[in-house]
Amino acid sequence: MRAKDEVSAMLTGLAPCDGCNHRAACRSEKLACLDFQRWVNTGSMKFRENLEPTHKIYRMVFRSKRAA
């Protein structure tokens, strides 16, 4: 599965992205925040107040994933 498809699949269920103002930008610009990274790695839905999605965090989340 391509990384883009995996992101789309993840964002269809309950996720820290639900209700986030950055959601659309993260999907289109390959951004991620620390809450998203924690959720992917642990399943934890703990939230921080200041969400600052970056390309760096996105790359850390998907570093082992390669687009087909």
Image (cartoon, rainbow, N blue to C red):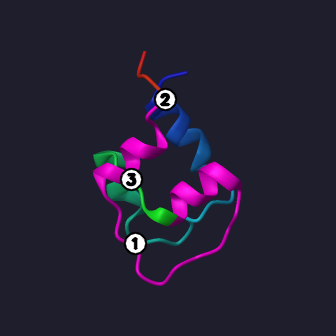
Q: Secondary structure at mark 3?
A: helix
Q: Amino acid at mark 2?
A: Ser
- For disc 3, the marked residue is 57
**Marks 3 and 2, how far apart in space?**
13 Å
Q: Secondary structure at mark 2?
A: loop
Residue at image coords 62%, 60%:
15
Q: Secondary structure at mark 1?
A: loop
Residue at image coords 52%, 55%:
37
- As drawn, 43 above or below 10: below
Q: Is residue 51 magenta?
A: yes
Residue 42 percent across, percent down from the top left: 69, 54
**28 left or right, relative to 43:** left
* Mark 1 neighbour density, 10 Å: few (under 14) some (14–19) many (20 or more): few
Residue 26 figure quarter: bottom left
- As drawn, 48 above or below 34: below
- For disc 2, the marked residue is 64
Q: Amino acid at mark 1?
A: Asn
- As drawn, 2 above or below 60: above
Residue 27 percent across, percent down from the top left: 39, 49
Residue at image coords 34%, 45%:
30
Residue with the most extreme bottom position: 49
The label nearer to you, 2 versus 1, is: 2
Q: Is residue 28 magenta?
A: no
- For disc 1, the marked residue is 21
